[in-house]
Structures are given as C-alpha cells and as structure tokens.
C-alpha cells in the first residue's frame, strides 16, 4: 500500500526571511500595489520540483524564493520536492496544494501525465508581458509543449558547451579546444588524447549520451508530429549514432559496461580527471564538481559544417502554473518576475543561473561577479550562438530517450549494430504510443 503523503503543513517548512534582490525596478507586469491601492492579501505559493537532486529548500529559497518575497511581500514561496510519499501523482491524488511546477522541457511529461497544465497566455496578455526579451527558440519549446499556448515561462537553462581539462592538454603538448570547432575537429583531438601513460588511462571525450541524442542539432524528433509515431529509419539518425559512437571506440579509450552511463562519464572528467573534454548539457557545473584541483576552461559546443554554428536544441527549465492553483494571478506575477532583466542579470553575474534572455549584457556577464568560479573563464561559450529549432515534444519523450540511449550503449559495446538498435527502438516506442492511445 502506498503511504498517503503527509500534509503540506508537515512537509513544508516556513520560508526563510527575504534576501535583498538588487537592481532597479523595471515596471514589469504584476508589480506591488501602487499608492492608494489596497494591500494584497497574503498568499502561500507552493513551488514543486519534480526531481530529487539539484535543488533543496535552502538553495531554492536563496535563488528563487527570497527574491520573489522581496519583490512581492504578500507572497510567501514554499518549496516541495519529489521524494518518498511526495511524488507528483501522489500529491495530486491527495489534493495537496501545488501552485507552480518547475521542470526541464525534456521532463515536462510529468506535468502532462497528471493533468496540471494550464494555458497562461490570456493572463500574460492582460499583464502586457513582453515575450520579445526571451530567446525565441527557448520560448518555442514551451509553445510546442503547450500546443500553441504557454503553460508557464522559462526561467533558466543549462549549458551547451565543452569543458576541457587544461592539464591533460598541457601534459601531452596539444593546443586547447577552440571556439567554432566541428565534430570532426573534436574527434581528432580526442584521438590524440586517448592513450595509456604511466598506468593511467586517458580518454578524449565524454558526455551524457541520452541528452546528446534527445536535443540533437539536426532537430530530429522522438515522435513525428505528422504521423504521431516514431521513425528512426532516416540516415540522419544513423549519422548521429555513428558520430557519437566513434569517440567511445578509439583504440586506447574504448568504453565498457561500467563507464558508459552518465554518472561514470561525469566522474571521468570531474572526479577522476582522466577525460580531456566533457560535453555539458544536463546542468550548470558548480563547486564541488569544479574543484580547485581541476584546471579547466570552456569552448563552444562542436558543430556540423552543414548546420553552420547551430548548437543543440534548447533545454530550459520552465516554471508552470498549475490548473489547480487558487492563486494563479500571484503565480504568474512571481514567474514573470523571474524572467526580468532585474532578476536575470543578478543571478547571471553571481554565476547561479544561465539566462533565457537575449540580452547580451546578461549573457556575457555570467559569472563575472566577485567570488564566482566562472570569473575569467570563456563564458561566452556556455550558450550557442544559435539554438537548433526545438523538435516535437511529447509525453513519450523521456521513455523513448532511454530506448535510444540504451541502444547507443549496445552499439558502443559492440553488442548490436546501428540498424538493429534503431529498428528495435522504433518498434518499442510505437508499442508504447499505441498502448497509451488504447487506454
């Protein structure tokens, strides 16, 4: 029997006192009451995070909650996170208060599966929200999920870049990766770095294979929007597999079952420090991952010549206002504030959040505040010059990505050929889609 979730009164602690959020007011929609207006009634807004890692109550309040409270004193943000007894389906079934769900676009199916989506487009128009300030492909991803509407707003994104270990390049006398490198350029570098010396194995490149497939640069979808089915038979899908698999088949750095999964690959670069390059697409790396012992910098994400300087598809985290919220206006005000230059510039300078804005000052100012580990680094390479157009996004994407990732593992390990794994992934994904349609 599933244990009934505790009530929010027990699960949620009282929000901490608001910290100052510097920067002049920009007069955004939903600002504090004007002189002569009645004070707004105090409200609690519950923000729910769908994963068990990355954020906790303290970091949420410091990054999001306290600035919202400073901007809107009548709002008390509270944080709730997925865990034992607090999964989203469990809380929805129990009728618990959830006003905002924040999750990456790649996992937005978690919102859709429990029917919490709500189109806030009319409220944004009423508030005269300026969408033009947001990076267009980032906003386009939300409109695909919202089927033309918007269930929420993007607040931050993840890097699409290459971290590299300067000490490894220095050790073997090779030049560092350059901005504008192609995938073939990167492969040549990886080939040179892949070796065993003094009993230590060095590998050229590592990365999160599932994400590399999911937000691929040619914008290939998991589910074709026209047919509503998966189709992995194209030569472009085969080309993606070939391109990635070759890095893991180099003579001196062939992967085995223990080091193909994402955590092992992360450890190779950040912990063991025997990987020359790491393709970052999952989260912004901070201390202690980027420890003082790691001599690192960053370069732009590898490109395909036929696509110019196009990087991967955007992978932002959206803050979604729920259909069950009794405080939708306050929730829209709160998430709108998180997209303002006032807020984004501060968090960018602190090196806390990668911006979703187009503004060059905000983008180039990332990590340039005092105390940031990114100060003096090549921060302009963290985000691509141009995002690939977001492909079709569906509630099946998360499970299909796992099929594609496991298939790529099989190719790398020599268990199956590319044609076989793509055919099997297509068959299995279409079974899932059909089964869902027959429910």
Image: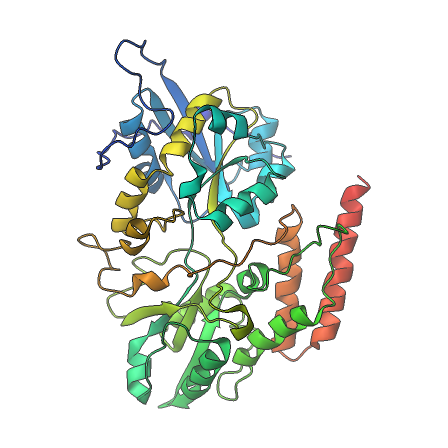
Residue 9 percent across, percent down from the top left: 43, 23
Q: Is residue 241 visible?
A: yes
Residue 283 percent across, percent down from the top left: 42, 55
Which quarter of the rendering shows the C terminus? top right
Q: Is residue 3 visible?
A: no
Residue 198 shown left or right of residue 435 in the figure: left
Residue 59 percent across, percent down from the top left: 33, 42
For the point 44% across and 80% down, which residue is it?
203
- Give the vertical position of 120 relative to 232 (above or below): above
For the point 60% across and 38% down, which residue is it?
146
Residue 274 shown left or right of residue 246 in the figure: left
- Give the vertical position of 282 relative to 251 (above or below): above
For the point 41% across and 82% down, which residue is it?
202
The number of discs equals 0
Residue 61 shown left or right of residue 368 in the figure: right
Which quarter of the rendering shows the N terminus? top right
- Its colouring scheme is rainbow
Q: Quadrant of residue 149?
A: top right
Viewer-closest of 78 and 183: 183
Viewer-closest of 198 and 141: 141
Residue farthest toward the left in the current orientation of the protein? 370
Q: Quadrant of residue 336?
A: top left
For the point 26% across and 53% down, which residue is it?
365
Q: Quadrant of residue 410?
A: bottom right
Residue farthest toward the right in the current orientation of the protein? 438
Residue 386 percent across, percent down from the top left: 46, 59
């Amino acid at each position: 029997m599933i244990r009934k979730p505790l009530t929010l009164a027990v699960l949620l602690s009282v929000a901490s006192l608001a910290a100052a959020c510097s920067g002049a007011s920009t007069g955004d929609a939903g600002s504090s009451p004007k002189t002569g207006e009645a004070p707004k009634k105090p409200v609690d807004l519950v923000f729910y995070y769908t994963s068990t890692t990355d954020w906790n109550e303290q970091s949420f309040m410091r990054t999001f909650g306290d600035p919202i409270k400073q901007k809107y004193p009548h709002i008390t943000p509270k944080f709730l996170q997925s865990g034992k007894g607090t999964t989203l389906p469990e809380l929805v079934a129990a009728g618990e208060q959830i006003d905002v769900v924040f999750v990456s676009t790649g996992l937005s199916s978690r919102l859709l599966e429990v029917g919490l989506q709500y189109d806030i487009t009319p409220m944004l128009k009423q508030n005269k929200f300026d969408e033009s300030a947001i990076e267009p492909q980032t906003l386009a991803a939300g409109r695909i999920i919202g089927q033309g509407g918007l269930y929420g707003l993007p607040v931050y994104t993840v890097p699409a870049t290459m971290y590299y270990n300067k000490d490894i390049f220095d050790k073997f006398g090779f030049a560092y990766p350059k901005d504008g490198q192609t995938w073939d350029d990167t492969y040549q570098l990886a080939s040179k770095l892949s070796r065993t010396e003094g009993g230590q194995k060095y590998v050229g490149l590592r990365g999160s294979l599932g994400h590399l497939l999911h937000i691929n640069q040619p914008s290939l979808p998991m589910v074709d929007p026209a047919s509503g089915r998966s189709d992995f038979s194209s030569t472009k899908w085969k080309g993606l597999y070939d391109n990635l698999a070759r890095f893991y088949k180099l003579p001196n750095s062939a992967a085995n079952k223990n080091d193909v999964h994402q955590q092992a690959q992360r450890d190779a670069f950040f912990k063991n420090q025997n990987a020359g390059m790491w393709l970052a697409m999952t989260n912004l790396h901070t201390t202690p991952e980027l420890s003082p012992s790691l001599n690192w910098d960053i370069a732009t994400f590898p490109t395909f010549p036929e696509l110019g300087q196009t990087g991967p598809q955007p992978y932002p985290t959206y803050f979604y206002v729920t259909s069950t919220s009794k405080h939708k206006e306050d929730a829209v005000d709160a998430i709108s504030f998180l997209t303002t230059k006032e807020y984004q510039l501060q968090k960018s300078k602190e090196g806390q959040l990668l911006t979703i804005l187009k503004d060059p000052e905000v983008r180039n100012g990332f990590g340039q505040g005092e105390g940031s580990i990114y100060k003096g680094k090549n921060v302009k390479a963290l985000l691509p010059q141009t995002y690939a157009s977001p492909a079709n996004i569906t509630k099946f994407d998360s499970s299909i990505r796992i099929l594609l990732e496991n298939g790529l593992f099989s190719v790398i390990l020599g268990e199956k050929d590319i044609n076989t794994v793509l055919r099997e992934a297509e068959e299995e994904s279409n079974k899932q889609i059909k089964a869902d349609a027959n429910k």
